[in-house]
């Protein structure tokens, strides 16, 4: 069968475009949370979000890509690092660590701010889906909580997904739920960012290695780590093995000024009345501020699971 020069040219352009698309996807994308949630939803309500898997392992540097076959996610629950940044003239300033702060200072189960959320454990949970992984399990701590239905269950502190096959030229999503919270009624808290460490695994035999200078490849191959490199990490995870830092796997909780209104003492916060925004703003003197919750080294250690790394002593799988 003969092909015309025009047909061959069109085919070549098509192949080139597809190749470029795949290379660009693998080089520039990463793990991300695909949507935010709002504070102030009714007590007991749940929001749903998704964790995006946006590229395979090592394609841009070595020319060889591997499908993602497993993933581990850890929620900051063990002495998480809490920082604050003030908003001035609509511009967010630098974050400063608050050594004595706890989650309970900012998150509550009711608008009246009478019952504090003391931990992010059990606030997150998997939604069953086999779009990418055939096996998923919530990682749980030895601590337990009695639910409103009277069931005592170990606290969810992350999850592990295995038996997957995310093709190198496709994106994937892992759905999960979040048990909604309120911000403190008398505070000027604008939003909360939870930095969640994630590891995408393309070979369970691979261990974190080091970057190859000027590339996205790592010496070990087959593992991509998404953690803020400014954080302290456990000994098995050298900072040089981290794929990307702050902002890649941020889960954001925005303040809903209607359901979770700002106090008048705040500076420049939107005002709501009768369930709608009025277009006016508070004229108080207290600055709006954002809070960031980051994982400790002990939290990051929970990324290990049976078959990849060494699980943290005491963690259970249910």
Image: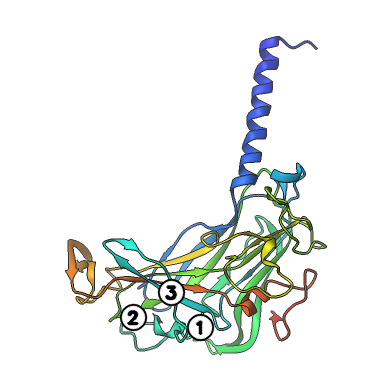
Q: Earlier in the sequence, mark 1 or mark 3?
A: 3
When the figure is inspected, residue 288 is found, relative to residue 144, above or below; the finding is above
Mark toward the start of the polypeptide (2 vs 3): 3
The x and y percentages for residue 252 are: 45, 65
Label 2, label 1: how far apart the Cα atoms are: 15 Å
Which part of the image, by quadrant, shows the N terminus? top right
Give the number of marks.
3
Of the pair 185 and 41, the residue shown nearer to us: 185
Colour mapping: rainbow
Q: Which residue is mark 1?
A: 119
Structural crowding at the residue carrying mark 3, measured as other residues with C-alpha within 10 Å and reported as few (<14), some (14–19) or many (≥20): few
The quadrant where residue 298 appears: bottom right
The C terminus lies in quadrant: bottom right
Residue occupied by mark 2: 184
**Marks 2/3: CA–CA distance:** 20 Å
Q: Which residue is mark 3?
A: 96
* Image quarter of residue 205: bottom right
Could you tell me how far apart the alpha carbons at marks 1 and 3 are, in whole angstroms? 21 Å
**Disc nearer the start of the sequence (2/1):** 1
Query: Going by the image, does 96 lie left or right of 21?
Result: left
């Amino acid at each position: 069968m003969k092909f015309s020069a025009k047909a061959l040219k069109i085919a070549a352009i098509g192949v080139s475009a597809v190749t470029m698309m795949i290379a660009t996807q693998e080089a520039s994308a990463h793990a991300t949370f695909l949507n935010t949630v709002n504070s102030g939803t009714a007590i007991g309500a749940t929001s749903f979000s998704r964790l995006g898997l946006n590229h395979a392992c090592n394609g841009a540097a070595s020319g060889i890509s591997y499908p993602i076959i497993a993933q581990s996610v850890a929620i900051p629950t063990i002495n998480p690092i809490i920082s604050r940044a003030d908003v001035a003239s609509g511009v967010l300033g630098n974050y400063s660590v608050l050594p004595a702060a706890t989650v309970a200072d900012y998150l509550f189960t009711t608008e009246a701010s009478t019952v504090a959320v003391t931990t992010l454990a059990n606030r997150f949970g998997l939604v069953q889906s086999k779009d990418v992984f055939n096996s998923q399990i919530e990682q749980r701590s030895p601590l337990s909580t009695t639910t409103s239905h009277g069931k005592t269950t170990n606290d969810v502190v992350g999850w592990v997904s295995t038996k997957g096959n995310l093709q190198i030229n496709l994106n994937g999503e892992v759905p999960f739920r979040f048990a909604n919270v309120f911000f403190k009624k008398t505070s000027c808290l604008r939003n909360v960012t939870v930095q969640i460490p994630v590891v995408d695994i393309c070979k369970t035999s691979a261990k974190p290695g080091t970057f190859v200078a000027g590339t996205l490849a790592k010496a070990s191959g087959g593992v991509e780590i998404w953690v803020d490199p400014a954080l302290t990490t456990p000994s098995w995870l050298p900072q040089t093995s981290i794929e990307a830092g702050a902002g890649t796997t941020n889960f954001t909780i925005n303040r809903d000024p209607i359901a979770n209104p700002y106090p008048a003492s705040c500076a420049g916060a939107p005002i709501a009345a009768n369930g709608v925004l009025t277009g006016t703003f508070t004229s108080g003197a207290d600055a709006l501020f954002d809070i960031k919750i980051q994982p400790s080294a002990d939290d990051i250690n929970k990324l290990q699971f049976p078959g990849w790394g060494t699980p943290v002593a005491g963690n259970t799988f249910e």
